[in-house]
């Protein structure tokens, strides 16, 4: 099974009693921060999860 962005939004919503818009805003903001950090040439390290770097 693949976890999609919609699945992630749904899980965040249900685990935190949020509206669809709130869940979507959180996921979109997180993705934007990661993307912008990578574009600026920096790596992203999320402890106990993984490291993202631009290739």
Image (spheres, rainbow, N blue to C red):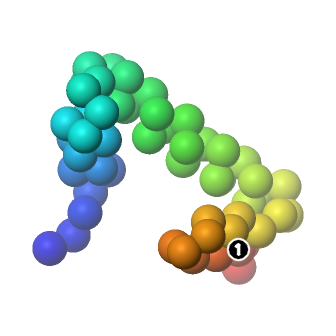
Q: Position of residue 33 (x, y in %)?
A: 66, 44
Assign a secondary structure to mark 1.
loop
Looking at the image, residue 2 lies above or below residue 16:
below
Q: At 72% from the left edge and 48% from the top edge, which residue is drawn?
A: 36
Q: Which residue extends farthest right?
A: 41
**Residue 12 sits in quarter:** top left
Q: Nearer the viewer, residue 38 or 17?
A: 17
Q: Quadrant of residue 4?
A: bottom left
Q: Is residue 49 left or right of residue 22?
A: right
Q: Is residue 7 left or right of residue 34?
A: left
Query: Is 47 positioned to the left or the right of 44 in the image?
Result: left
Q: Residue at x 26, y 20 (%)?
A: 19
Q: Is residue 19 left or right of residue 34?
A: left
Question: Percent position (x, y) of residue 7?
Answer: 22, 50
Q: Is residue 32 above or below residue 47?
A: above
Q: Residue at x 64, y 53 (%)?
A: 34
What residue sits right under mark 1 in the picture? 53
Please report the residue visible at 55 percent of the width from the left and 43 percent of the height from the top: 30
Q: Residue 9: image x %, image y %?
A: 30, 41
Q: Is residue 35 above or below residue 23?
A: below
Give the quadrant of the N terminus. bottom left
Q: Where, quadrant-wise, is the C terminus in this rendering?
A: bottom right
Q: Residue 9, can we see it?
A: no
């Amino acid at each position: 099974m693949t976890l999609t962005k919609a699945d992630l939004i749904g899980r965040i919503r249900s685990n935190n009693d949020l509206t669809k818009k709130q869940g979507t805003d959180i996921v979109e903001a997180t993705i934007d921060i990661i993307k912008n950090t990578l574009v600026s040439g920096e790596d992203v390290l999320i402890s106990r999860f993984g490291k993202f770097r631009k290739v």
